[in-house]
Amino acid sequence: MYRIFRFVFWFLLTIFSFELIYLLYFFSFFEKTSKDVFTYEFLVFFNITILFFSSFCILYKIKFYWTREKEIIESTAKNVFNFAKIGLLFFNDENEIIWINEYLKLRHKKLIFSSIWELFPRIINIYSQKKISVVEKLDDFYYNIFIFYDQKMMILLDNTDYRNLLTEYENNRLVVGILNVDNYEQHKNLALNYNEIKFNSLVNGVISDWCEKNNIFFHSFEKSKFLLLMTKEILDKLKNNNLIDDFLNEIKTKTKNFKFPITFSIGIGYGSNDPSDIFQFATNNLQNCIAKGGDQALITNIMNNYSYSVGANFEQRSYSKASKIMFFGRRLIKTLEQTEEIVICGHQFGDYDCVAAGIGMYYFCKNFISKKTILKVLIHINLLDENVKKKIQSIIPMKDLEAIYFLTPEKYKITKLNTTLIIVDTHIGKRIENPDLLSMNFTNSFVIDHHIFDQDKSVKIDDDNILIEPSVSSTSEIICELIFNLVKFLEKIPKYVFDLFLTGVLLDTDHFRKRTSQRTLEITSKLLENNAQIEVAENLLTDTIEVANIKNKILKNTFFYKNKFAIAIADEDLRISMSIIAQVAQQLSYLEEVKASFAISYNNNGDAAISCRSAKNFNVQAIAQELGGGGHFSAAAAQWKNKTIYQMQKYLLTILKEK
């Protein structure tokens, strides 16, 4: 057909050319020679008709050829765009869409005159982050978007199939969970009026119903532990519908009439192609949940190391931990009865809770050891805050100080074969009074603490020898539980020990404003029964004029961020104790509408230090953990070596920006 068209085209063009030449010649010649008017007019008319007909045919063929080629090009382009799934649009100076190709017309309605910034808000990232393209979702489709602003043009490459495939892959990722019945042993040990078969039936029934309802595979591999297997899609459903939180509450509701309501802890991991990695993360998360008081779930995406908690958006409610503490105490007593040398150690720059716990544990141990056993407390009084040091010396006789403490920070050396190390008020290896103790070959090691567990920084000892109870007010309260329940002759314990216990409780509860349970008040009552005096404790906690001036100086540098965070930063030349920094943060937390408060200063070692406090149900422990520290839900701290307080302040603001 194309050859025929070319032949006709050139044939008509030839006729047209001859007619034109003949007409020009005829006019010039006939005008001179012919006298037959009719013949002349006929020939003119005939030739002009031929000329017009030839011209019409040529123009028609040209138009036909052009139209056909245009249709072929447009059809080909349309098929290419549709086959390659490419959208094309143009916009005007007002960033409104003025033209779209057929591919986009078939997929989307009402794009014309729409703003590109409203339809595709993420294209700003092409400029701000210097990206080549961005992924945007329009209606139910995903596109890689390329923008050419000079040409007022955008290209949209469809990647919906890839995204759907990726989503399906992510939804079917393996998720491993480990569920623990937190207080299984307490119920068993206390022999409740609820026999073991019925108890297991209740627990297994709740777990079985929940798993079957949500398509979760479960298997019991220990009496108190269950393996959970599910997909990421099921996990997202649990999270989005608060089904994990409901599950945690369900078991407590069904056992609310028990002496200790049953609680669950769940560690969950996903995001790796290695099942052993996922299982390990689930195990670690479960340990963290248990250490934080249980009754919660911790979920970690291994791929981006992102974790979030369920059931831990508030400070853990304190169910009685008496059974667990007694079990630990009896295990400790068995060890004490056989040991030849005992070292008790607290954390660096010890506060009243640390000092009270150390001295209290000293007198606890004295009740269960032989006279030949060496017993020392390595909380160096010379390294305490100066104000604390003076007041400690004012209530403890020097002969007792010399018997209990090493008054100089010399390195301790083990002298016996069967030795025991007891760490109080911390479980972080780098924070203990003498970190070198951890490299010594102690036969047994124990930890007693009330701060939220940090597995990565914790000392590495037998799990059965670690007692961490974040739900209690202080380490002083834990030691009091041991003394009041396991020591027979309380009269052998000096009165100042009970005064120190009361001071530690008052300090860590902020005079019963925080972390105060019914058991905390009961312990306080017992302290008063054993002649502890509130007046003595309050005197120990009062400030000197010098300390008051330092605190006021820092408070003057307070500013408020986002109208809910109070931040005070000390002058650069100031070096103060952590206890003073903590008191400044505590004082700021009393302000109305302040969710959390932060005080930043250099400590006595010249390290940048921060103390965090909350009063409005805000988790400052998570903030401190991001800063490399730790603590409690409502009280935490962190310290940086070789960094400035201004660098710490800048990083703090970066964290708070997302809160």
Image: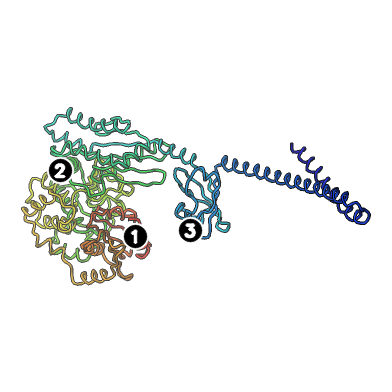
Element at label 1: helix
Q: Which residue is mark 2?
A: 322
The relative height of residue 342 versus residue 574 in the rendered view (above or below) is: above
Q: Quadrant of residue 205?
A: top left
Q: Which residue is mark 3?
A: 128
Q: Mark 1 or 2 closer to N-term? A: 2
The percent position of residue 274, horizontal first and vertical second, equals 42, 36
User: What's the CA distance linking mark 3 and mark 1?
Assistant: 24 Å
The amino acid type, in three-letter code, at marker 1 is Leu
Residue at 92 percent of width and 53 percent of height:
34
Marks 1, 2: nearer the viewer: 1
The relative height of residue 357 versus residue 297 in the rendered view (above or below) is: below
Residue at 21 percent of width and 37 percent of height:
251
User: What's the CA distance linking mark 1 and mark 2?
Assistant: 38 Å
Element at label 3: helix
The amino acid type, in three-letter code, at marker 2 is Ala
Whether residue 27 sits left or right of residue 411 in the image: it is right
Whether residue 150 sits left or right of residue 108 in the image: it is right
Category of crowding for the residue at label 2, using alpha-carbon neighbours closer than 10 angstroms: few (below 14), some (14–19), many (at least 20)? some
The percent position of residue 105, horizontal first and vertical second, equals 52, 45
